[in-house]
Amino acid sequence: MSSPFLLLGRHHAGTWLIALQLAIGVVLCLQAWQAATGLQAARNAPDGIDDAGLLLVPWIQVAPAADPGVGDVLHRLRGVPGVLSATAANQVPYGSNAWSVHAWTPDRPAEQNVVSVFLTDEQFSATLGIAMTRGRDFMPREFHDWAGDQADLHANLDPAIISSALATRLYGDANPLGRTLLTAPGAQLRVVGVVDRVPPPTSAPATRDLAMMLPVRMVHAGGAQFLVRHTGTSDDMAARIRTALSTAYPAIVVADPVDMAALRDASLHAPRLRARWSVGACIAWWVSSLGLLMLGGQRWVQDHAQEFSLRRAAGATGRQLARRLRLEYLGLACVAALLGLACGGWILPRIAPGWRVAAPSAWAMLAAVAWATLAVQLAAAWPVRLARRIPPHLVSRSPSVRL
C-alpha cells in the first residue's frame, strides 16, 4: 500500500533519511541545552568561598638570598589602605600552582585518593570566607612554620580540615571528626573540621572537590601566594598593592594582582567551550537540515507539477494542497522529534553515560519538540508556496493526460 504522503510518498528511504536528520537535530538541541545549563550551573554554584572583594597576588619572583619572608610581605599588604585582611598559602583556589597528595584511611590502604592540599595560616579561612560545616577551625597553638623541607612537613602534621567530598569519600555517612587519615608513610592526620568546599587550582588533577587544609605557615615568600580581602574596586586596589610591594621590594618582580571572580570565570573555560561548540553545532545542523528540506521540497514540487495540476483540475484548491503539505511536514516533524527524544533521553545515556551533564528536563524536551515542529513548518513554506502557484490547466498541456 502506497504512503499517503503527497510529497514523500514515493521515496520511503528519503523520508526516513530526512526524519533521521531531523532527529539528530533534536538530539543536538538537547545537548546544547545541557551544555548551556551546565555552564550556568557552574557559574551560579556556591564554591565555598566569598569571591567578591578578593584579590590574588600570584607570585613573587625573588632570589632565595633576597627573600623578604612571608611575614614581612603580609605586613606590607595589611598596611595598604583598603585592605581588610591578608593571608598566604602554598596554593589558592583557581590559581595556576597546584599541590596534591594521596590520602587514605588506615583500614583501607589500597583506596588512595588524589587530594588538593592547602597549607594555611591563621587568616586563611577568614580572608577567603570559608565557614565550618562540622567541627572547629585550627587553634593558634596548632600552627607551625614550614621552610620547605618535606621531611619536616610530614613530621609535624596532626590536625586537618577536610572538604565534605573528601569526608564522604573516606568515611561515608559516618562522622569524620576525630578520625584519622594518612598522606605519606608515617604521616597521620586527625580530622578536626569539615568545610563545604575549597575550590582547587585550575592546574590541579581531577581531585573532584577532594581537599584538605593543614595548619602550616609558609616561610619563604618566593614559594607562597597571597590573598587579600579589600574594599573598593579591584583595579584600584590591585594598583595600590603593586605600588606598595614594588616600593618595598624594588629588586623583586611582583605579578599583577588578579580578581578572584575573574579567576573563577577563567576556570570555566572547558564548560564554556563545550557550550559554544554544542550551540554552534546545533545551529549549523539545523540551518543545513532546513535548507536541504526546502530544496528537496522545491525539487519534488517541480518534478510533480503535473500531478499537482491534475489535483487542481479535479477540484482541489491551492489552500487544500497547502494544508495537506503542511500536515505531512507536521507528521514528519513529530516522528523525528519522538525519535530524537528516545535517542537523546534513553539510548545515548546507556551507550555513552558521560555524554551529558544533566538529564534533560520536561521543559527542555518540550522546547526541542516545539522547535522541530516550528522549524519544519518554516521549511515547508517555500514548497507550499510553489504548489499553490501551479495552475489547474497545466495538465492539459501534457500528452500523457490529454483527452
Image (spheres, helix red, strand yellow):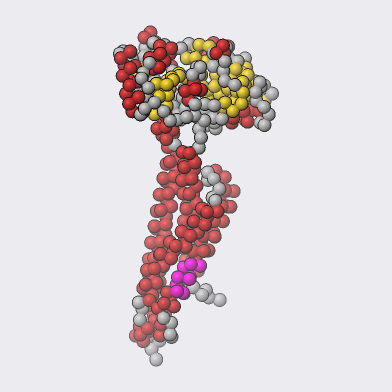
Asked if residue 275 shows in the view, the reply is yes
Most extreme residue toward the top is 65
Q: Position of residue 211 (x, y in %)?
A: 55, 26
Question: Residues in magenta?
Answer: 323-331
Residue at left offset 44%, top offset 36%: 268
Q: Which corner quadrant of the image does residue 397 belong to? A: bottom left
User: In terms of depth relative to the viewer, which is nearer, 57 or 277?
Assistant: 57
Which quarter of the image is occupied by the N terminus? bottom right
Q: Is residue 222 above or below residue 389?
A: above
Q: Which corner quadrant of the image does residue 290 belong to? A: bottom left
Residue at left offset 42%, top offset 74%: 322
Asked if residue 201 shows in the view, the reply is no
User: In terms of depth relative to the viewer, which is nearer, 9 or 373?
Assistant: 373
Q: Is residue 363 above or below residue 51?
A: below
Q: Is residue 296 above or below residue 361?
A: below
Q: Position of residue 22 (x, y in %)?
A: 47, 59
Residue at left offset 54%, top offset 60%: 338
Q: Position of residue 141 (x, y in %)?
A: 56, 11
